[in-house]
Image (cartoon, rainbow, N blue to C red):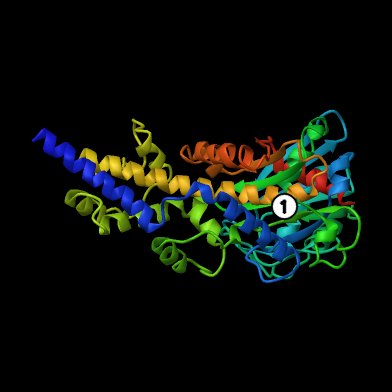
Amino acid sequence: MRKAGIAEMVVKMINMERFLKESGLAIDAGAMKLYADDFDKEMIRGLHGEDSSLMMLPTFIPYEGSADGGSGAAIVIDAGGTNLRIALVQLGGAAPEIKYFEKYPIPGFKTSVTAEEFFGKLAEYIEPIAAESDKIGFCFSNPAEILPNRDARIIKFTKEVKVAGASGVIIGDALRSALKGRGLPHSKHIVVLNDTVATQLGAMADVSERGKYSGYIGMILGTGLNASYTEKNGNIHKAPLIHGTPGATLINIEAGGYRGFPRGEVDAKFIEATIDPGIHWLEKMTAGAYQCSLLLKWIRFADDHGCFSRGFSERLAALAAIPVGEADRFYFRDEGPTPGGDALSKLCAEPADAQKLGLLIQAFFERISFMIASMLTGIMFRMNENAPAPQLPVCISVEGSTFYNARLLRPALEAYMREHTEKQFGLHYHFVKIEHATILGSALAGLAGN
């Protein structure tokens, strides 16, 4: 009986491995150059203003001013998610110094406000430091059109923040008006940027570290996915005010929009059911907001193809959702109380089911890691053309809970990059986590973008 059981388990494991290959969940690591090259080419198409899944948005923030290291004090507004952070940052010394820091709920989260009320609250929160600097770096983590003067026009608020009449409002103009209304100094130079660009600049704010790197990438891998880097102005054909001028400019890639990775049947159906199914394919296949839902779709798909036992199928039918962190918990066999009640472990009454589910989860996160590694490698291919010292590593400044908390993701990502990005392609990099990256980066933008 025991020998028969082991033989049956081996056959089922082989069936799972075949399923992973045939369904498209298993990846071919040798294809990284193919995807990295395509990502690079898609970036070039976006820079030319041609049809591309990458928006390649110029920030109008000059690399030269940023790399020189802005000097002085800047007021920072960091409006991300449901929190609002106000700071005063001093740059130009041996290390950046945060001289003032306060945190508030963002106006419009629990109760809807008007645009005038929103900016009035910002002016109120800035009041204690309004006279300390005439430069403001505003990290605005909502859809907005960055303008050539480095201000921005609001497209909309997201993340359950409700600000009536905000669409079309020019951020800097509205803030200056609100400051004036409170009798505060209002002749402010305001630079607006998103959190990804601020994360890149956050690594650049430390003068003492700059000589170590050939360039910088900012990456957000949390609820969503995005990346930024620096591009030669002569290559930014889509922006006539920049193209043909000397120097370089920071670019918001909007990397989550990339559509070049193959999608399995599960991915295609999952994306089709999301809001705006025609966009953000890479983000929907990788980022934290989608991982648990997509993983559950893959488990159901594998079950439909006979990969698990009948008991597993019956229990799976009753599982409505996978709690955040549950995949890691199951894979690493964590013990102790959990809000999810060991949802995945309860599916697996038979050891074979647990082993096969572990294989599927591992393949799911390895594919995510491979896609992110290919994306970063493609960006470095693009940067290698521009880098003044390509023998030095690229600094990849990362923010986001998915990158730091998903235990199956980062080791696989770094393994792919060691074996391919570094050993195969000769590109070097350092992942760094900068404390208060968006605060420091916003301050540098406020100073460097003057």
Rendered image quadrant of residue 259: bottom right
Identify residue type, mark 1: Arg
Answer with left or right where residue 355 lies relative to residue 401: left
Q: Is residue 377 above or below residue 145?
A: above
The percent coordinates of residue 68 (x first, y second) are 88, 41
- Of 119 and 304, nearer the camera is 304
Q: Which residue reaches farthest top?
A: 94
Rendered image quadrant of residue 75: top right
The percent coordinates of residue 152 (x first, y second) are 77, 62
**Residue of label 1:** 382
**Is residue 336 at least partly visible in the picture?**
yes
**Is residue 97 at least partly visible in the picture?**
no
The percent coordinates of residue 345 (x first, y second) are 28, 40
The percent coordinates of residue 360 (x first, y second) are 36, 47
Task: Name the residue: 58% across, 42% down.
Answer: 420
Answer with left or right where residue 54 lies relative to residue 77: left
Q: Is residue 182 above or below residue 98?
A: below
- Of 211 and 252, nearer the camera is 211
Answer with left or right where residue 364 lies relative to residue 60: left
